[in-house]
Amino acid sequence: MLGAGGRHDRTVPGGVRLWSREFGESGFGSAWCALTAAFALHVLDEATTGFLHVYNPTVSAMRARWGWFPMPTFEFRQWLIGLSVAVLFCFALTPVATCGPWPGFMPFSGS
């Protein structure tokens, strides 16, 4: 069904409209994949340059000065596993970002 502005509208149960063709052409999926790749490279950079050797003492010093400081300290293994899971989760969402708008993505898209 051709909707307003020449979009191909698709309605799913519950009356939520999806604009799959325009969304895919908008480049959101490509941008999501590129952002996730940049995130993965950032994690790799932090892992190879000893980020935790700076981060953990900084957090400990801030906690000593302000007891309420909410940031945790990490061991390398748990830190790397947690960020790796986050990167893999973001990559797993790339097909969703490419194929069509899922209502949960809209706050991140700026639309």
Image (cartoon, helix red, strand yellow):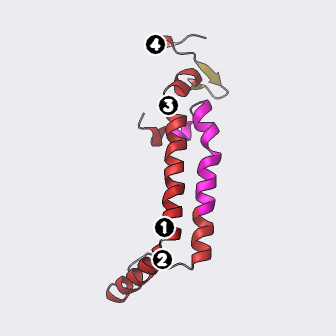
Residue placed most toward the observer, 23 or 30: 30
User: Disc 2 on helix, strand or loop?
Assistant: helix
Residue placed most toward the observer, 98 or 63: 98
For disc 1, the marked residue is 46
The alpha-carbon separation of the residues under discs 4 and 2 comes to 50 Å
For disc 4, the marked residue is 5
Secondary structure that dominates the magenta span: helix
C-beta proximity under 8 Å, tags 1 and 2? yes
Mark 3 closeness class: few <14, some 14–19, many ≥20 residues within 10 Å = few
Amino acid at dot 1: Glu
Residue placed most toward the observer, 30 or 4: 30
For disc 3, the marked residue is 27
Mark 2 closeness class: few <14, some 14–19, many ≥20 residues within 10 Å = some
Q: Quadrant of residue 29?
A: top right
Amino acid at dot 2: Leu
The alpha-carbon separation of the residues under discs 1 and 4 comes to 45 Å
User: Disc 1 on helix, strand or loop?
Assistant: helix
Give the number of the mark in front: 1 or 3: 1
Q: Quadrant of residue 20?
A: top right
Q: Earlier in the sequence, mark 3 or mark 4?
A: 4
In the image, 89: left or right of 63?
right
Q: Earlier in the sequence, mark 1 or mark 4?
A: 4
Q: Start and end of the magenta stretch?
A: 84-105
User: Disc 4 on helix, strand or loop?
Assistant: helix
